[in-house]
Image: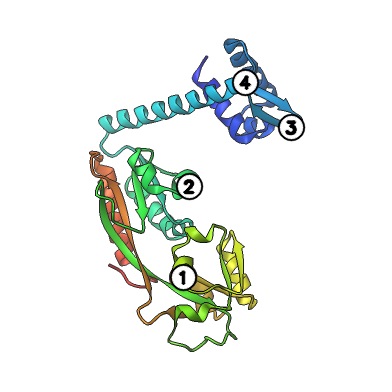
């Protein structure tokens, strides 16, 4: 069995389809099928069940997949460590942020940083780590987490900026022109939010602690949420920088929530017990500097 076989098992399991897996591995479907037969012959058992166009793991396949993921991660980590020993300006930074919309402002900085550190690979762990950044930082599957809180004593936090959640409303909404609205005024309004359980949304729990919206719409994309607000189908609560182009064009309006507002501070977190390579420390410092110089955020810390 070779490393290429481990990549094959992982990709076929992820894709669930030979054609898609072959495309991702830059193989012909025939070559992929041949390699799959090789590894199944090596293990003397079937790793996948061919069900029409779907490929489903057998019990043996599940075991091989778990091993493949561990081995491939070990190889990647080893390569990164060796590169760091050879060159202080070469290596990998595994990164995530707790909020999907944050990748919007992060993209500009990543381009700038890679211009300074061209030999550092930035690996954005989008799906797995975004939902539980702290856990992945503790288990060393990421190196830097962009997080909303600073309460874990095992992390080193560097403050980045502070933003504000506001009510997003249509131009003809009765709240237009108001300085702020109170939580109880959301009662009876249609509420548009991201696709997630209400109990996992801090804003929902805060606003609707003592009341309920008339109706809840759950939408995956920010753009779709804003289109529904524009159409007058309800109100949403988002950070001001997310909706800045819509505000500037007059497509939507914003209202502060309570006189004090709902403020959120962002931090870059790293594991305190882990000695970071020089380029990771530089990444965090430059990110803090970049955010302090950036325009369009509610309040820079």
Residue at image mark 1: 209
Q: Are marks 4 and 3 in contact (CB under 8 Å)?
A: no
Q: Which mark is residue 53?
A: 3
Nearer the observer, 87 or 216: 216
Question: Disc 1 on helix, strand or loop?
Answer: loop
Q: Which residue lies furthest to the front in this view?
A: 210
Q: In this view, does 70 lie to the left or right of 279?
A: right
Quadrant (top left, top right, bottom left, bottom right) of the C terminus: bottom left
The total of numbered circles placed on residues is 4
> Horizontal and vertical percent for residue 120?
35, 41
Q: Earlier in the sequence, mark 1 or mark 3?
A: 3
Name the secondary structure under disc 2.
loop
Q: Is 214 or 222 nearer to us in this picture?
A: 214
Residue 277 x, y percent position in the rendering: 25, 39
Q: How crowded is mark 2: few (under 14 residues within 10 Å), some or many (20 or more)?
A: some
Lower sequence index among marks 2 and 1: 2
Answer above or below: position of 139 versus 126: above
Asked if residue 296 lies left or right of residue 170, the reply is: left
Q: Badges 2 and 1: C-beta atoms under 8 Å apart?
A: no
Q: Please name the residue that numbered disc 2 is placed on.
A: 126
- Dot 4 corresponds to which residue? 47
Residue occupying the point 65% across, 23% down:
48
Disc 2 to disc 1, C-alpha distance: 31 Å
Lower position in the chain sequence, tag 3 or tag 2? 3
**Mark 4 or mark 3, which has the lower sequence index?**
4
**Whole-percent x, y for residue 245 in the image:** 51, 73
**Res 138 label:** none
Q: For the point 49% across and 59% down, which residue is it? A: 199
Mark 4 neighbour class, 10 Å CA radius: few under 14, some 14 to 19, many 20 or more: many
- Mark 2 or mark 4: name the one nearer the start of the chain: 4
Q: Is residue 286 left or right of residue 214?
A: left
């Amino acid at each position: 069995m070779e490393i290429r076989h481990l990549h094959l098992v992982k990709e076929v399991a992820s894709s669930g389809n030979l054609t898609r897996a072959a495309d991702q591995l830059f193989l012909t479907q025939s070559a992929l099928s041949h390699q799959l037969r090789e590894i199944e012959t090596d293990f003397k058992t079937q790793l996948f069940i061919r069900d029409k166009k779907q490929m489903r793991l057998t019990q043996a396949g599940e075991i091989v997949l778990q091993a493949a993921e561990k081995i491939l991660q070990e190889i990647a980590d080893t390569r990164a460590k060796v590169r760091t020993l050879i060159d202080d300006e070469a290596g990998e930074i595994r990164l995530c942020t707790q909020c999907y919309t944050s990748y919007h402002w992060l993209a500009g900085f990543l381009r700038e940083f890679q211009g300074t550190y061209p030999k550092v690979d930035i690996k954005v762990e989008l799906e797995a780590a975004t939902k539980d950044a702290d856990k992945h930082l503790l288990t060393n599957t990421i190196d830097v987490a962009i997080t909303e809180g600073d309460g874990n004593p095992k992390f080193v936090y560097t403050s980045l900026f502070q933003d504000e959640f506001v009510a997003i409303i249509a131009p003809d909404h009765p709240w237009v022109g108001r300085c702020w609205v109170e939580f109880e005024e959301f009662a009876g309004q249609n509420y548009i939010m991201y696709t997630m359980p209400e109990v996992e949304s801090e804003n929902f729990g805060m606003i609707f602690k003592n009341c309920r919206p008339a109706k809840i719409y759950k939408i995956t994309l920010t753009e779709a949420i804003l289109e529904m607000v524009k159409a007058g189908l309800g109100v949403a609560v988002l950070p001001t920088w997310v909706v800045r182009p819509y505000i500037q064009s007059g497509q939507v309006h914003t209202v502060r929530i309570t006189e004090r507002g709902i403020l959120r501070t962002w931090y870059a977190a790293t594991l305190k017990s882990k000695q970071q390579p020089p380029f990771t420390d530089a990444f965090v410092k430059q990110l803090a500097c970049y955010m302090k110089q950036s325009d369009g955020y509610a309040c820079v810390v």
